[in-house]
Amino acid sequence: MGVGDPLVFVQTLDCLPETIAERRRAPRRQPAHETVCRLTDRDGDPIACGLVWNLSATGVSMLLDVRLEPGDQFGAQLASAGGAAVGVGLAVVHVSRMRTGDYVLGAQFSRPLGEDELRPFVA
């Protein structure tokens, strides 16, 4: 690198504090194109539909257009463009508002998903 060249920093789990890296229970995976997560209330009524950003056996990160609160619990259905679907409970862990007005939500599943359940939803 020459003088004045910009520095590039790539963050990996290795550079995170050990306490953050240890919280990852399962590796994050890139979702298949157009994978969504539909959220429902206890009566099965629709709450929201989020575009899945990443997915693991124990949870999901998604983009939503409604604000939910950490600790909220919902029914969830992962659905792929190919028609695959799997239902699971979901608890909101964190929510961040984006400049666009949308929200990024991180949530934990009520149970780990098996490899066969995950396969249709990962790239």
Image (cartoon, rainbow, N blue to C red):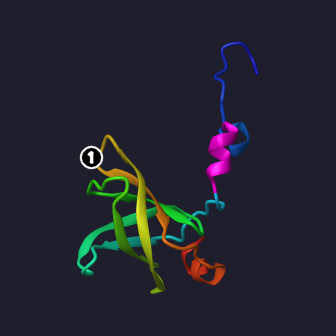
The residue at which mark 1 appears reads as 101
Relative to residue 3, is residue 83 drawn left or right?
A: left
User: Does the magenta run of residues contain 50?
Assistant: no
Q: Residue at x 57, y 66 (%)?
A: 58
SS type, badge 1: loop
In what quadrant of the picture does the N terminus appear?
top right
Q: Residue at x 64, y 59 (%)?
A: 25
Which secondary structure is most common in the magenta stretch? helix
Q: Which residues are magenta?
A: 16-24
Count of marks overlaid on the render: 1
Estimate the x, y position of residue 97 in percent, counting from the top left: 33, 44
Relative to residue 66, is residue 63 drawn left or right?
A: right
Corner quadrant of residue 13:
top right
Tell me if residue 16 comes above or below residue 91 in the rendering: above
Q: Residue at x 42, y 63 (%)?
A: 91
Estimate the x, y position of residue 88 in percent, counting from the top left: 45, 77
Looking at the picture, which amino acid does disc 1 mark? Gly
